[in-house]
Structure formats: C-alpha cells, structure tokens
Image: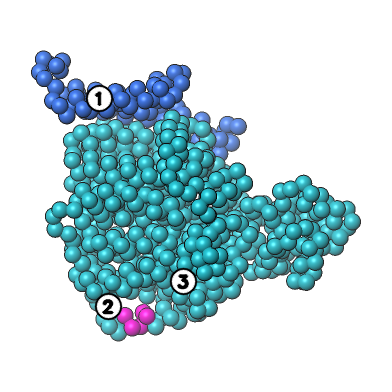
Chain colours: A cyan, B blue
Amino acid sequence: MIGGIFWMIVANGAALLGAHALWRRIRTGAAGIDAIMFLVLRLLLLSAAVVVGGLSGFLTPMGLGVASAGVLAFLLLRGELRKVRFPSRPDFGRTTAILAALIAVRALAQVWFLAPSSGDALAYHLPKIGEWIRAGAFTREMGLDPCVTFPAGFELVETWWVVFLHHDLLIEVAGIEFAALAFASVAALASTAGLSPRTAFLAATLFVLTPLFTLQTTSCLNDAPVAAMVLAVTALAASRAHPLQIGIAVLMGMGLKGTFLYALSGPALIAWFWRDGERARPASIPWTIPPLLAASVLGMFWYVRNALWYGNPSYPVTAQGLDLGGVHVQVGPSLASLESNFSSLLTSLVSDRLLPYQTDSYRTAGWGVTAFASGAVGLIHAMREDRTLRRLTVGFGLSLATVLMLVSHDGWYPRFALFFPAILCVGAARLASISRPIAWLVFVGAFLQFGSTLTSRDLVPSKTMALLRQSWRERSVGPLYYTRELPAGEAVAVYSTVRSITYILYSPDFSRRVVYLRVSNAEEMMERMKREGIRYVYVDVSSAHRKQQILDLVQESRLRSLNERLYVLN
Amino acid sequence: MSPHGTAIPARQVAEILVAVALILWRIVDRTADGLWMDWTLVLCMYWITSIFAGAREQGAAAVVFVAGLMALYLWYQLPQALVPLGLRP
C-alpha cells in the first residue's frame, strides 16, 4: 500500500504539472475559459494515461507510476515547476465560502467513509474496473449486464483513483474532479452574464449543492460528470472560447455517455448567439492540436471498440433502441416523449414529492428547493432584465427540450437533464445579490439542501452507519448484502440473467477472482465451476425454471445455500 | 392600458400572452385538484405580477413568491425526506 501511495502522489504530480504545462500554452487570459480548460486538460491526461496503460498491459501501480515518474522528471528538468502561477485568492464572500467548504469537507468525508452502493454502479459501471484492475489491462470480460459496453470515460477517471492503491477507497474522488469542473463552468457562465465574482461563486456553489448532483458526485454514476461537461461546453461557447478548445470538451464528453450529445443543441445555439465579436485566442493554436487529437481518441474510443468487437458502435443499442427488462432505451427523437417527459417534470418531479432523493433520480428531479423557488423566480426576473441571461436561458431550454425528446418516458429520465438547474442557480444567485431578504432565503434553502442530502433512499442512515463501522480496508456494501459468507480471496462464479450487483464480489482490494458464466442452465453452471476450480457461485436468475434447477441441486445436496444469492458446491 | 392609464409596451403584451398561454396549457394538462399548487402556474403568476409591478413592488413580490414556493416545496418534499431517516414509512 505504501508503494501505491507513493506512485499515486508521483502520478498526480505529473498529471497536475503536465496539465499546467499544456494549459499555459493554450490559455487565453480569460479567467473562466482558462479555469475550465485546466480542469479539462487534467481529466484528459488522467484518462489518456489509463487508456494507454489499459491497452499496453501496464495498468498497474508500477506501470503507470514509473511512466508518470518519467513524465514528472522531464517536466521538472524543463523547469515547468518554476512556471506554475497559482491563481489569486477568489472573492467568495464569507457565507458562500462557509457553504462551499462544508460541501467540500462532506464530499471528502464521503469518499473516505462510504463505498460504492448505487445499483447501476455496482451492476455495470464498476465490474469492468474490477476486471481491468485485476488483469492490469483492458479486458474483453466486463460482466454480464447488457450495459457494460456503454462508453466508459468516467470509469477511466475512477480507474485512475483505484489503480495505484489496488483498492477502491478513493474511487469517488473521480466524481469530485467533475464537480470541480461543474463549479468552474457555472461560475464562468454567471460571469459571462455580468455577475460579480461573489455572485458567480454563489451560483456555482448552489449548483454543486443541487441534490441530485451532490448525491451523484460520490455515487460512481456518470450523469453528474456528463452534466459537468455539458456545462463546460456551454460556458466555453458563451465565453467565446476558441472552437478547438470547445472541441476538446465536446470530444471528452462524447466518451462519457451517449446522452451527452443530446444536450449539445443548447451550446450550439449559444455559440451562434455569440458568433460576432472577438474570440478568446489560445496562446498557441498548434499546441491546442495535440489535446484535441487525444480528446478525439478518448471520445471515439468506446464507439470504435464496440464497432470492432460487435459490429455496432453503439452496441447493444440498435436502431430500434434497447429493451432492458421493462425499461426501453429510446433511439431518435419522439414528440410523445418530449410531451410526457416535460409534463411530468413540471407536474410532479420538479417538486420531488413522489419519493425521497435517490442517486439515480428515480421519480424525482432532484433539483432542490433553491432551484424550485429562488432559482425559478430569479430566472424570470433576470430574463426580463438581462439580454445575456435571456439568451443563456433559451440555450439551456433548447438543451432540455432535445434531451427530453430523445429519452424514454421512464422513472429515471430526469438525471439526463441534470445540467439544467445550473441556469436556475445563476438566477437565484443574481436575485440574492440584489435583494437581502432573498439572499437570506437562498442561504436557508441551501442549508436545508445540505441537510436533506446527508441521506438518500439508496443510502439510508443504517447502511451508512454499517459502512462507518467497517475498517477502511474492508469498507464495502457487499457484507450488507450477500458476501458475508464468502471466504476472503476465494474465487466466485456468477450465474445471472438479470441486472445484478456483481461489483461487490471483487472485494474493495480486488482480491477475489470473479468468473462470469455464460451458461443456459444449472447443469452447465456446475460443469463450468468444476472446470474452473470454483466452489462458490452467486446466483441471480429470473425465470421460474432456472430457479427450480438451482433448488433441485440444493435438494440433491450437490449445492448448499449460504444466503439468498450465494451457494457453495458440496 | 396599464393600471396607471398608460399604454402597455408591445414587449410586455408579448410576455403576458406567453404567460397566459402557459397557464392555459397547465390548466389543460393537469387535473383541477392540484392546480392551485402547480409550480408553472405560480411562476406565471409571478411573471404577470412583475410585469405590472413597479421596481419597489417587484422586490416585494419576489420575496413573497420565493417564500411561498419554498413553503410549497417543503410541504411536498419534507415527508419524503423523513423516509430515509426512518421517521416515516
């Protein structure tokens, strides 16, 4: 572990200094654009390092660590450290600073004390990381869920925070990296609208406290990162950034999730609104090309991989969409979806009255009281008075409309529109800056949001307390579900025909081999287990006849049940 | 004519028409029972109020509407917030 910590520090030093070296060559002098580009470049370098490590078989602490040490030595010899200029202390305002500090401290505490627990993360986002870390390389095996082949740009950043320690203790830091990007982007947007630095930072702080965003930041789900990248592109467009710089952010976003593309209509319209006038010019255009090329590779990587492996860039989604046991992934626009999504968003979801907050936004918008009250009133106020904010709002509205038109009307769609509360937060901050009573209401709302996002429907206090009682080495939701009876380090097979939370099987230190069985019945399962020399099996099947086959094996004493999902060979 | 007896500018007429159209859409779109607590409807009322209010009244209206909407949100969401805490089934 000590070696891992050493390599992690070296690698992050190299990534920071490398991002700075690139950044100072393409900075524009416009604070908003430059802040966003620094964070995007850092994410670009982390992601690129993991892709290179994954493809070359050096996705190990030593592999990435030694390469990073080489890069760091090169940068130090080039004198890059002496060229680092720290930004001047930002003017937050006292209350905003306290609120932002509370959010930051809570997020870091959640990184340490919580473990991945969201169903989607455990079922299809994270198992691939388990396979990559165990193999020290990218693997074709990523799990049994149909969604494992979706773009995994966010998982690259998560892998960066896992690979050096060979442990998932810090995996949620990846979400914090994107929260920082969202913060910088909303502040830049607010500044574009002529708001003071204090007001802009308040808007940014309010956005990262948006319930769904703040819950997703440390939940290993990729909707908050997508929202952050949409906001980055929007802010770059509104700040008249150079098209090559906007291109870097767009391409990075493509690699996060396909739905990122659905929201680009708004930034495109905003870029068109701001087409006249002088553009911010990077210090060096030629130096902008390599990051753009790297972003192209990262953005296209998953689509090209799927085309090569499965003959379909968007596999398993086809022109007809994808059916996932009652949930349909829509392909192409639908006015019916737009009408249904928009209507239910305004009627019930925006008020978060149907269910408690949940990281996957199930039947809630998760925009919070600030966006709902002071944000909406403030935005109307702002639109009536300010042309820039009117244009920004039209852009955000267009993005919202295209997203709602392109996603199915299911229980989870609001997470795809997680970027939208940003413009409401700008409205709230602006109104707070001109009315003291409103400022009080905004801060009351913000502190209420802080309190109400300490728990969620999928991470209730009892579960949180159970995680807190575990040592950091063993912290996992696995024992709270099905892995308590699984001996440490013992390999386990998975026989599953439904969405199943298999990431918990790897253990936080990825010490357990997980073998996914692609078999059609229980007899084949037994045969495969014997061939692989595996005694334990995690069973999660849906059909009655498959369940009966397992019961038959138990009755024949060939298999023994340890709990609802876990069995061992007799 | 405005309450002060002056002609309403064309832009404000357009704003009122959009707000009224939104109100009509909400009335058509949802059932009558929850209509008085509809977010869009409340916001349209604020919008129309702010069109006719003077600068001083606009500030007061904003405070009233923000406070009202906060109360409305908490009325809706607070019971749900109690569920994860085990204080409500």
Mark 1 surroundings within 10 Å by alpha-carbon count, few (fewer than 14), some (14 through 19), many (20 or more) = few
Whether residue A482 is visible to the viewer of this picture, yes or no, is no
Q: Based on the displayed image, in which of its 4 quarters is residue A81 positioned?
A: bottom left
- Residue that badge 2 annotates: A80
For the point 56% across and 35% down, the residue is B83
What residue do we see at 38% from left, 62% from top?
Answer: A252
Crowd band around label 2 with a 10 angstrom C-alpha radius: few (<14), some (14–19), many (20+): some
Highlighted range, magenta: A71-75
Element assignment for label 2: loop
Q: Going by the image, does B62 lie left or right of A55?
A: left
Compared to residue A339, the image places residue A13 above or below, namely below
Q: Residues within 10 Å of mark 3 (few under 14, many from 20)?
A: many
Q: Which mark is residue A50?
A: 3
Horizontal and vertical percent for residue A280? 18, 61
Q: Residue at x 78, y 55 (%)?
A: A562
Q: Earlier in the sequence, mark 2 or mark 3?
A: 3
The amino acid type of the residue labelled 3 equals Val
Q: Is residue A329 above or below residue B46?
A: below
Is residue A455 rendered to the left or right of residue A423? Answer: right
Question: Amino acid under label 2?
Answer: Glu
Disc 3 is placed on an element classified as helix
The residue marked by circle 1 belongs to what chain? B
Chain under label 3?
Answer: A
Please tell me whether the stretch drawn in magenta is mainly helix, strand or loop: helix
For label 1, the residue is: B17
Whole-Å distance between the Cαs marked 2 and 3?
Answer: 23 Å
Rendering coords of residue A454 (x, y %): 48, 44
Q: Quadrant of the N terminus of chain A?
A: bottom right
Is residue A221 or residue A485 the one in the foreground? A221
